[in-house]
Image (cartoon, rainbow, N blue to C red):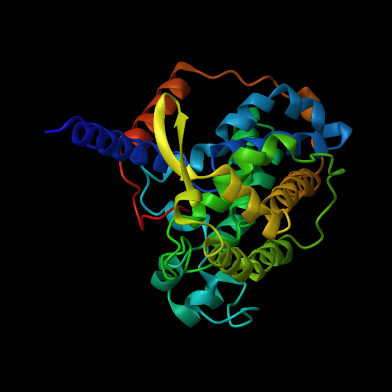
Amino acid sequence: MSVNKLVIAAMVVVLTASSIFYSQQVQAWGFWAHKRINRIAVFTLPTEMIGFFKEHIEFVTEKSVAPDMRRHAVEGEAPKHYIDIDHYCSFPHACVPKDFDEAASKYSVDTLTAYGTAPWNLKIAYKDLVYAFKSLNTNRILRECAEFGHYLADIHVPLHTTKNYNGQLTGQKGIHAFWESRIPELLGENYDYFIGKAVYIDDVEEKIWEIVYESSAAVDSVLNFEKKLSQEFESDQIKAFEERAQTVVETYSEAYSVAYNNMLDDMSHRRLRTSIINLGSFWFTAWVDAGQPELSKLTKYIETEEDLKAEEELKRQYREEKIKGREHPH
């Protein structure tokens, strides 16, 4: 075998391995974005809450990605992260009942599960959040807040609201991670995170569906602009190779990513900011609905040996096992 062929063969091995590695890093908003959303949301909270949350900010930040890791261990977790709402009818999707029982009666539970249950799951998660604050259990409050942040952030992503979730129906496979991971990870350090203070949400269910509809309204732009841009770039300028965690990976080039972001008028940035202020507002609303308990009197959370073992097992399953459920980048 010639030297050139040996080099090419080596590159194939490296890139195959790297593609596996990289695919595990681009779940949902991407780990970087999920952690950033939860972390910055802490600073939107009122005085009565912010001390407790700042004390546990690392926990709320790091545990924001637990739901994505759990998708590799728990059957039925995956549908909680999205809703392919255009499966039912075209925008503005008035055909989909907001009440789960009504929706299940109209379409069946199996159908709702197949195409995602994100908004209904969030309604349940919100009730769990209120109960957590009422319980005055530090561990429960922190876990519910961190994981609610993940699910809420997911519905701010346009591609979490469409059956064409990864551009697989339009020859744009890979666009999911491109929009929600590559762009914020590339540009996110320069985003503006001064977004004001959390506000009380009068109708939690209505707000959840409002976010879903806002995301769904942006799907056409996300897909059509990338399709148009791909015709303006030479094929060898769209992708590039970068080193991540000592591994070479193929990803969208910086020039292509910036051009796409500009075409979308910084949409990823805007949806990230909206995720943050909405998360802070949901946390605040749940605390108010729980009777505004005095968080300053709660004990500091300390991870037990049992917690650490469970965390390690979750990470192992995430590294080694496939998603339990429909496999896609949600």
In percent of width and height, residue 235 lies at 45, 55
| Quarter of the figure with residue 133 | top right
Instruction: Name the residue: 34% across, 40% down.
Output: 20
Looking at the image, residue 167 lies above or below residue 152: below
Q: Is residue 122 left or right of residue 105?
A: right
Looking at the image, residue 231 lies above or below residue 321: below
Q: Quadrant of the N terminus?
A: top left
Front one among 12 and 326 = 12
| Quarter of the figure with residue 309 | top left
Q: Is residue 303 left or right of residue 18?
A: right
Instruction: Name the residue: 50% across, 55% down.
Output: 176
| Quarter of the figure with residue 142 | top right
Instruction: Name the residue: 85% across, 50% down.
Output: 199
Looking at the image, residue 306 lies above or below residue 48: above
In percent of width and height, residue 136 lies at 69, 33
- Does residue 128 appear in this view? no
